[in-house]
Image (cartoon, grey):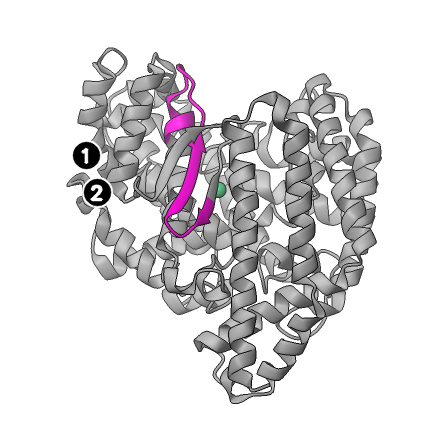
Amino acid sequence: MDPQTAYDELIGRSREQAILASCSAVLGWDEQTYMPPGGAAHRSRQMALLAGLHHERATDPRIGELLAIVEESALVAEPGSVAGANVRELRRTYDRRVRLPRTLVEELARTISMAQAEWVTARAASDFRRFRPWLETIIRLKREESTCLADSLASGGSARSVYDPLLDEYEPGARTTELVTLFEALRRELKPLVAAIVEAGSRPAGGGAGRDSSAAADAAAILRRRYPLERQRVFGEAVAAAVGFDFRRGRLDVAAHPFCTGIGVGDCRITTRFEEREFGDAFFGILHEVGHGLYEQGLDELHYGSPLGEAVSLGVHESQSRLWENLVGRSRGFWAYWLPMARRIFFDALDDVSLDSFHAAVNHVAPSLIRVRADEATYNLHIIIRFELEQDLLTGALPVGDLPAAWNQKYRETLGVTPSHDAEGCLQDIHWSAGLIGYFPTYTLGNLYAAQLFATAQAELGDLGDAFARGEFRELLGWLREKVHRQGQRYRPADLIERITGSRPDHRALIASLRGKYAELYGV
Ligand code: ZN
C-alpha cells in the first residue's frame, strides 16, 4: 500500500472515531440537561455500547499497520506539517490505548461508575470512611495504568515519575518535575501577595488609589443582591454574543454542573446554573464556558476529526476559558462598557453601584475552602494542594486513610483556613471519584498560559482595556483564533505557548497581571 493511501485511510478512520465520540457527547449533554430521571438506566446502556465501539475501533491493529507504513515515508518528514503532526498525535493515542489491557479499562470503568455514586453519598454525609475503600481501589488501578503506559510517553524517554503517564494524558509532553518547579515558584509569589491583599482589604477605609470607601469594605455583597434569573440569562447571552460566541452554532442551557461540549462542526453546547442571589456564579460561569466554546467554534473545520482540528490539551482549553472569564471579564475596561447595560437590566440591584465598587466586587479576594468558588488570586493555591496530594497518594507516600488530615494541614499552612468537615475538605471535588488523577494541574497551567497569551496579545494589539471599554472584543478573538484555535494539535502545548509568547510555561505573567490589578484595587 502506498503511504498516501494509508494516510488517507488513517484520517478517514480518525474522522469516524470523532463522529462516534460526538454521538456520546450529544447523549452526555442531554443526560445533564433535559433527560428525565427515568432515562438513566437506558442512557447508561447507550453510553456503554458507544464506548465499547469506540474502544474496539481505536485499538484495531489495522491502525498500527497504517501508522507503520506512513511513518516510514516522506509524508511525515516535516514535523510541523499537517501530516507530520497528525501522524505524531494519532501514534500517541494509539500507543496509549493498546497498552491498556481491556480488563483494566473495564475494571476502571466499573469502579468509577460505582465510586461516583458512593462519593455523592459520602459527600452529602461528610463521611470520608465511606469513600475511602473506593479511593483506595481507584489509586491502585491508576497506578497499574501508569505502569502500563510508562514506556509510551510521547516526546522520547520513559516516565520518570509514576505521575507522568497520567499527567501526559491531559497535557501531552508535560512532566511532573517541571511542574513541581513551576508551581513552587508560583506559590512563593502568591502566598505573600494574597496575605497583602487580605490585609489591605480588611482596612475599614478600603484603601487603594482613592476609590470610594464602600469598594473594599464588603465588596462582594453587591453580587448577592437580587438578580432575577430570566434577566441574568438575557444579560449573559448578550455578553456571550458580543464577545463572539456564535449562537447559530451553539446554545446555552442550564445544568447542575456547568460545562462546555463541542459536539462537532457547527454545534457547541455550553451550560450554566443560575442563582438569584449569586450574580457571579452564573455570569462568570457563562463567560468561562464561552471561552471554552470560542475555542471549539474556532477549530479548523477542514481538519475536523483529525488532530489538527482538535483542541491541543486541557491546559490550553482552560487558558481560553480563564482568559475570557478573568482577564477580560474581571477587567475595568470590560465593566466600563457593560455596567451601564447591567444597571438598566438589574436596576434595583445596581442603581447605586459605581464602576469602582462593581470592579472591586468582581475581584474580591478571600482565602476560602471551596475551590470552585475561589477568587483569581487564591485559586491556584487550591490546585497546588491537590497536585501535591495526588502525587503522594499515587506513590504511596500518603496512605488514603491519612488523606483528610493531610488535606486539612495543607489548607491551614497554605491558605490559613481549616475545613470543619470533609465535605468542605477532601470530599469536595468530583475528580478523584471519576478516576481523573493528573487532571488538576491543567487548571493552573491554564491560568499561567492565559496570562502569558494575554500579555502577548496586549503587546501586539495595543491596550486591550481601551478596546473593551468601547465594547470591542473581536480583535482579541481574531488573534486567539489565528494563534491558538486554528493550530489544533500542530504543536505540543508547551511548544505552542513558546511559539506564541516567546517563553515556555511560566508564572511571571500571571503574577504581574495579579499585581497590576490588586495594586489598582487595594494599593498593594
Ligand atoms: Zn474550564
Of residues 459 and 292, the one drawn nearer to the viewer in this rendering: 292
The residue type indicated by label 2 comes to Phe
Is residue 272 shown in magenta? Answer: yes
Residue 358 vs residue 137: left or right? left
Question: Residue at horizontal 40%, vertical 29%?
Answer: 200
Q: Quadrant of residue 220?
A: top left
Q: Secondary structure at mark 2?
A: helix
Q: Could you tell me residue 128's position as x and y percent?
A: 77, 26
Label located before the other in sequence (1 or 2): 1
Is residue 425 shown in magenta? Answer: no
Q: Could you tell me residue 202's position as x and y percent?
A: 42, 22
Q: Could you tell me residue 289's position as x and y percent?
A: 42, 39
Question: Residue at horizontal 57%, vertical 28%?
Answer: 370
Of residues 108 and 147, the one drawn nearer to the viewer in this rendering: 108
The CA span between labels 1 and 2 is: 7 Å
Q: Which residue is mark 2?
A: 468
Which quadrant holds the C terminus?
top left
Q: Which residue is mark 1?
A: 337
Relative to 12, say whether 246 is above or below.
Answer: above
Q: Can residue 183 be seen in this snapshot?
A: yes
| Proximity of marks 1 and 2: CB atoms separated by less than 8 Å | yes
* Label 1 residue near ligand 1, CB within 8 Å: no
Residue 254 vs residue 328: left or right? right
Which quadrant holds the N terminus?
bottom right
Magenta span:
262-283
